[in-house]
Image (cartoon, helix red, strand yellow):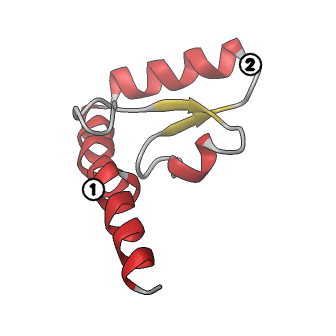
């Protein structure tokens, strides 16, 4: 949802999330269970407007590649191929 609404993403570096978020490309990843690292990522994104803009722009690719429209297209292709 954040990607779809042009909100920069900060996510925990855990399986699943780190498959969607490419660190410093589509979002920022912080070390799981590290409040200090999360705070550092929040500070980083707050103080670097160019980084925020790049993350928002690149986040559009996540919506395109993992969004509902893409998923529904894959399902349609699967059924068409049966």
Q: Position of residue 11 (x, y in %)?
A: 55, 31
69 over 75 or under it: above or below? above
> Which of the numbered marks, if any, corresponds to residue 5?
none
**Mark positioned earlier in the residue sequence (1 or 2):** 2
Q: Where is residue 34 in the image (x, y as percent from the top left)?
A: 74, 19
On the question of residue 60 being in view, the answer is: yes
Give the Cα distance between marks 1 and 2: 35 Å
> In the rendered view, does 39 fall on the left or right side of 64?
right
Examine the image and state in which quarter residue 47 appears: top left
Residue farthest toward the right in the current orientation of the protein: 33
Mark 2 burial class by Cα count in 10 Å: few <14, some 14-19, many 20+: few
- Which element carries disc 1, helix, strand or loop? helix
> Which label sits in the foreground, 1 or 2?
1
The residue wearing badge 1 is 69
> In the rendered view, does 32 fall on the left or right side of 17?
right
**Residue under the point 41% across and 48% down:** 26
Residue sitting nearer the eye, 66 or 20: 66
- Which element carries disc 2, helix, strand or loop? loop
Residue farthest toward the front in the current orientation of the protein: 82
68 over 37 or under it: above or below? below
Q: Position of residue 55 (x, y in %)?
A: 33, 43
> In the rendered view, does 59 fall on the left or right side of 53?
right
**Residue under the point 22% across and 32% down:** 5
The residue wearing badge 2 is 34
**Residue under the point 43% across and 87% down:** 81
């Amino acid at each position: 949802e954040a990607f779809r609404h042009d909100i920069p993403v900060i996510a925990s570096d855990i399986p699943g999330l780190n498959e969607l978020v490419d660190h410093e490309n589509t979002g920022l990843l912080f070390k799981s269970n590290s409040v200090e690292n999360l705070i550092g990522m929040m500070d980083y994104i707050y103080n670097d407007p160019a980084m925020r803009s790049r993350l928002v722009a690149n986040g559009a690719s996540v919506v395109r590649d993992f969004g509902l429209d893409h998923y529904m297209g894959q399902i349609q292709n699967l059924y068409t191929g049966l």
